[in-house]
Image: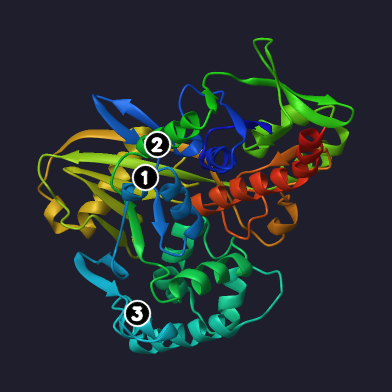
Amino acid sequence: MRVIVIGAGFAGMAAACRLAGDGHVVTVVEKAPRLGGRAASFERQGETLDYGQHVLLRACGAAQGFLERVGALDAVSFQESLAVPLLFEGRRWVLRSWPLPGVTHLAPGLLGYRPLSGRERLAAAHAGLALLASRSAKDETFAAWLSRHGQTERIVQRFWDPVVIATLNAPSAAASFAAARHVFRDAFLLPHGADMGLFTTPLATVFNAARRYLEARGGSVELGAPIGAISIRDGAACGVRLEDGREIGADAVISAVPPDALEPLARGLTDLESTVAAAGRLAWSPIVNVHLTFDRDVLADPFAVGIDSPVQAVFRKGKTIVMSQSSAGDLIDLPDHEIVVKLSQALRELLPSARDAKVVDTLVLRHRRATFVPSPGSDALRPKSRTPIPALYLAGDWTATGWPSTIESAVLSGVFAAAAAERDMAPADAAATAA
């Protein structure tokens, strides 16, 4: 089977490598001059940097499977057990998982959670047990559910929202209860599910490994090749036409681009337009990453999390501190220098070791449409892999994977689309072979 994959992010490369590994001939077409999509890397002053800071949880089995397939499993390093350094009011301590059964593995850490009073810790623990046991199908915000379970604004701000914002790129007031429950039940409340995996190399290393895997199996990648249209013959997808006029034929096409990039390709394809229009109603949330290079090391941990601070997740890259600010609507339109001043001041309040250090370089990276917001009702807008057009499939973290907008969702979507294409095209392949 000949397959064209549109888009070379995690979704597209996961689909392509799955198909190539099964013996199909795959061509990946990407309009950008580099691999990676929203997870791409770039060169600056002789250094390869990622556009964003990405983390895997041990519960992300599909992502780990993809890394293993392409020989890049060593690109991520997992903790032996969950240990999150927390920065609060100029002090540091570590929230740890303990070797206890079931949900109790977090109990000692929660009972010693300093930003909350003893009464607040017990209230948070009670809500955690209720969350684990809940079978509610009510489509409401997580904040509404938390309020009904005795969680005050301070508990939400200091305990629940740091996790929700980091994983869902939206606060509890915007995220759906279903999405938040998925994160907590399938990761943080599961022993070892939330063990943190940090990438030890730029993501370009991962995508280059995926490209080598694909090309070694007869596949190819075309960069800097924007699509002009999806070709349709007899009502089914049969290839693509590039903007430079070239036609590439195929037995199946997988689109692994976001809804806004798919929308122009869907125009005139009546059966696809309604699917894309529904996905177009998904809200998107920005992420801002701020790189501060100091004249000395200011953070001993590879990463840390700010509590009750404008600073959220902090990553150490040598003498450079990268502050990854999710749900960054308050920052996205500010000038670079205002963002740097605001966050550097907040960082110094959290980190005493940074107060006398000199900033020697700065970099601000904006991602206006970083992830979609898993708000109440959003699941109904997420399409499945198959489209109404035969031989045309969808992939992307925004499709119906059961996961929020993450690397895991992207990889799962690629696997789902590849599997659907294989199942649908198998009879045709068999008939052709028999003939």
* Left or right: residue 321 compared with residue 31: left
Per the image, the residue denoted by label 3 is 116
362 or 12, nearer to the observer: 12
Element type at marker 2?
helix
| Residue 190, position as x, y percentages in the image | 45, 76
| Disc 2 and disc 1 in contact, CB within 8 angstroms | yes
* Residue found 34% across the figure and 38% down from its top: 338
Report the mark closest to the observer, 3 or 2: 2
* Residue found 50% across the figure and 46% down from its top: 329
Per the image, the residue denoted by label 2 is 209
Q: What residue type is labelled 3?
A: Leu
What is the distance, in whole Å, between disc 1 and disc 3 at their CAs?
40 Å
- Res 72 label: 1
Q: Which of the two labelled residues, at mark 1 and mark 3, occupies the earlier sequence position?
A: 1
| Disc 1 and disc 3 in contact, CB within 8 angstroms | no
362 or 133, nearer to the observer: 133
| Residue 358, position as x, y percentages in the image | 12, 40
What is the distance, in whole Å, between disc 2 and disc 1 at their CAs?
7 Å
Q: Which amino acid does label 2 sit on?
A: Ala
* Residue found 43% across the figure and 36% down from its top: 207
